[in-house]
Amino acid sequence: MVMKAISENAKNIVFHQGNVITGRLTFARWRSYKASFEDQTNYVFNIGPTNIFKNKFNVVLDQHCLLTIHRKWTGAFKIRFSNDSEGQQLIFSQRGFIKIRYVLRDKDERTLAKASMKYS
């Protein structure tokens, strides 16, 4: 099933799967680095930068850090889970000629998921 992300305004993005709202991403203010994501079960995940360069972010639920996201200068994102003892790491990067395709890979370069953008 296709998931759609629709921007309501400059601060809110709503995620739909079919006719069901699966989540809402709300930024603290316009062009802010701080945000919160509320899923359909009403859990609220807070997202915020951890350094002055704003290229590392933590995703926090109930005062517990779930994962760390590091934005590389190449445009790729490294995702590291906090509760995993093996240090599982994922890489989310753009692919394709005009960079509208995204690929999620593990640290062994195996493709886990692909996403393509469709503008309407």
Image (cartoon, rainbow, N blue to C red):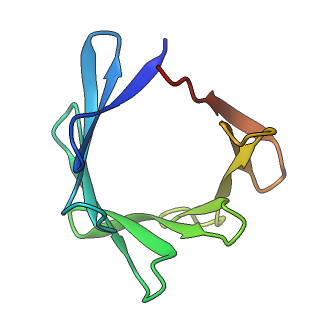
Residue at coordinates 31% horizontally, 63% vertically from top-left? 31
Query: Foreground: 120 or 57?
Result: 120
Residue 97, given in percent of the width and then of the height, sits at 81, 39
Residue at coordinates 40% horizontally, 81% vertically from top-left? 50
**Horizontal placement of 41 versus 67: left or right?**
left
Q: Quadrant of residue 46?
A: bottom left
Q: Quadrant of residue 70?
A: bottom right
**Horizontal placement of 97 versus 39: left or right?**
right
Q: Total marks drawn?
A: 0
10 vs 68: above or below: above
Query: Foreground: 1 or 116?
Result: 116
Residue 81, given in percent of the width and then of the height, sits at 53, 61
Residue at the limit of the structure toward the left, as seen here: 42
Residue 54, given in percent of the width and then of the height, sits at 45, 78
10 vs 23: above or below: below
**Horizontal placement of 31 versus 99: left or right?**
left
115 vs 92: above or below: above
Residue 98, given in percent of the width and then of the height, sits at 74, 40
Query: Foreground: 42 or 47?
Result: 47
Residue at coordinates 49% horizontally, 75% vertically from top-left? 56
